[in-house]
Image (spheres, rainbow, N blue to C red):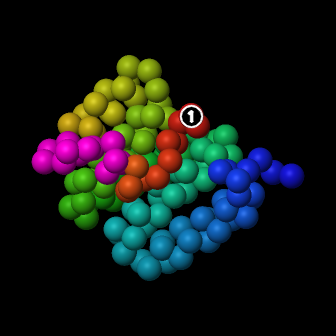
Amino acid sequence: MARALDGFPRVPLLQGTGRDAARIQGEGWSWSTALAEPMEAGIATLRGDRTPARRALLAAGARFLAAGMALHRAVARHRRGELIGGAVGRDLMVEAEAMVGQGICRPAQVISMLAPGALCGH
């Protein structure tokens, strides 16, 4: 049996999330594609494949920037920093937290709300 996520079977959850991401992307808006990419990054990370996850978050950041969605872009950068790790990843996370934190009391909670789950596998 596949490892469970908080008591739920992993495979059906990942498949359902993949279908949801595809539906969101299917809306055809640049921002809808951007919203689906962090979901795809989470799926890839849970499957142990960080390279596509990093690519999806980089693409999401560019799409969020083009759509004027600065908060979402910062969150994508933070999650990408988690995946990259080291000094480069830490710099991305600190920069993103500073952006998210402008006028927001609990930046970590906003990051968790907009991109649930730590992508680094902790």
Q: What stretch of residues is rendered in magenta?
A: 100-111
Q: Nearer the viewer, residue 10 or 60?
A: 10
In the rendered view, tell whether residue 11 sits above or below residue 31.
above
104 inside magenta stretch: yes
Quarter of the figure with the C terminus: top right
Above-or-below relation of 69 to 56: below
Label 1 environment density (alpha carbons within 10 Å; few <14, some 14–19, many ≥20): few
Q: Quadrant of residue 80?
A: top left
Tell which residue pokes out farthest to the top in this image.
87
Task: Give me the residue at 44% from left, 21% from top.
Answer: 86
Side of 12 relative to 71 (left or right)? right
Q: Is residue 59 above or below residue 17?
A: above
| In the image, residue 56 lies in the stretch drawn in magenta | no
**Residue 1, x across and y down, in percent:** 86, 52
Q: Which residue is mark 1?
A: 122
**Amino acid at the residue labelled 1:** His
Residue at screen point 41% across, 63% down:
35
Horizontal side of 20 relative to 87 (left or right) equals right
Left or right: 15, with 58 as reference point: right
Give the image quarter of residue 70.
Answer: bottom left
SS for dot 1? loop
Where in the figure is residue 27, as x and y percent of width and height?
44, 79
Give how far across and how far down residue 110 sits, in percent. 31, 51
Q: Is residue 62 visible from the viewing direction of this image?
A: no
Which residue is rendered at x = 61% and y = 65% of the image?
A: 18
Seen in the image, is 107 located left or right of residue 102? right
At x 25%, y 34%, the residue is 95
Q: Is residue 67 visible?
A: yes
How many numbered marks does the figure carry? 1
Outermost bottom residue: 27
Question: Looking at the image, which is closer to me, 111 or 77?
Answer: 111
